[in-house]
Amino acid sequence: MKQTDPPFSAIVLAADRELNNPVAEAAKVSCKALTPVGGRPMVLRVLDALGKAREVGQRILVGPAERSLAEDSELNGLVCSSQVGWIAPQASPSLSAFSALQSLPEDVPILVTTADHALLSAAMVDHFCAAARNSGCDVVAGLARYDLIAEAFPDTLRTVTKLKDGGFCGCNMFAFLTPQARSAANFWRKVESERKKPLRVVKVIGWSAVFRYLCGQLTLDYALAQLSKRMNLKVGVVEMPFAEAAVDVDKVDDWILVESILAKRDREASPQE
């Protein structure tokens, strides 16, 4: 980041998508964001990573509900002291993101991530933000190659979009870099409910993309070109070199995986007896 570049404002989507979230129920907390990972609520792990990142300035939580904030004294303290902003969640993640985007000045680049990105690190954040800033795009999403993830975590199941140039997984990291990029949150609403069904997501960008996808001929570049045309924005991706960037806590098995990853790190960091 150059001295003249404004830092990113980071929006963390921290509300549950549904009532009775299975991860929250398993962890016996009121919302998934408060699920302990390595003994620390994962929303605080995300805020820690953002706070250490060179590319990030302001941090804003969208959700959880006020009653959930009050359950964790550290999180509540961060919000009450204005170290972290807080906005009430809307009916869906896309509406929550749109609400938060509209609250910020148009000349500020924005990073959107989620509270269940429990393995997020400052290095991931800085890599993504720097590459997004230099992309020349309006909107950028983080992706990781499935081969990278499968090699690091062979037992995990991730949603994979299989393209001609490889399989890709989302990383729950999005950059909105220009004033016109704010409109992308409206487009997001169209694909939000289909996020776990790659073919239906591809359908949103047009039947030519669907045909190429079904024939195994859809490339990432073609998909981005079609998406840019549909959105009337320049859309790009940052390929993340971190397998952990594609691991979020979407279900109980993910929580178990993340706990095992952190436990392994602790063992490796401990001096051998």
Image (spheres, grey):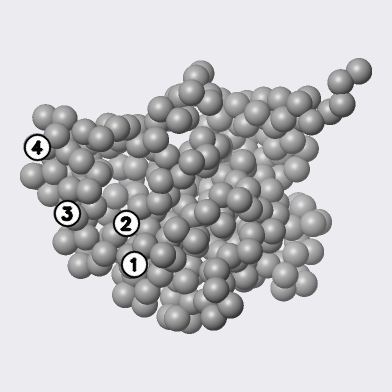
Residue 76 is situated, as x and y percent measured from the top left of the image, at 75, 61
Tell me which amino acid carries mark 2: Gly
Residue 211 is situated, as x and y percent measured from the top left of the image, at 9, 37
Q: Secondary structure at mark 4?
A: helix
Which residue is identified by label 1? 136
69 left or right of 206 in image: right
Tell me which amino acid carries mark 4: Phe
Q: In which quadrant of the rendered image does the C terminus lie?
A: top right
Which residue is identified by label 2? 236
Residue 219 falls in which quadrant of the image? top left
Which residue is identified by label 3? 226
Q: Secondary structure at mark 2?
A: strand
- The residue positioned 55% from the left and 37% from the top of the image is 244
Mark 2 and mark 4 lie on one chain; the one further toward the N terminus is: 4
- The residue positioned 40% from the left and 31% from the top of the image is 146
Q: Are marks 2 and 4 in contact (CB under 8 Å)?
A: no
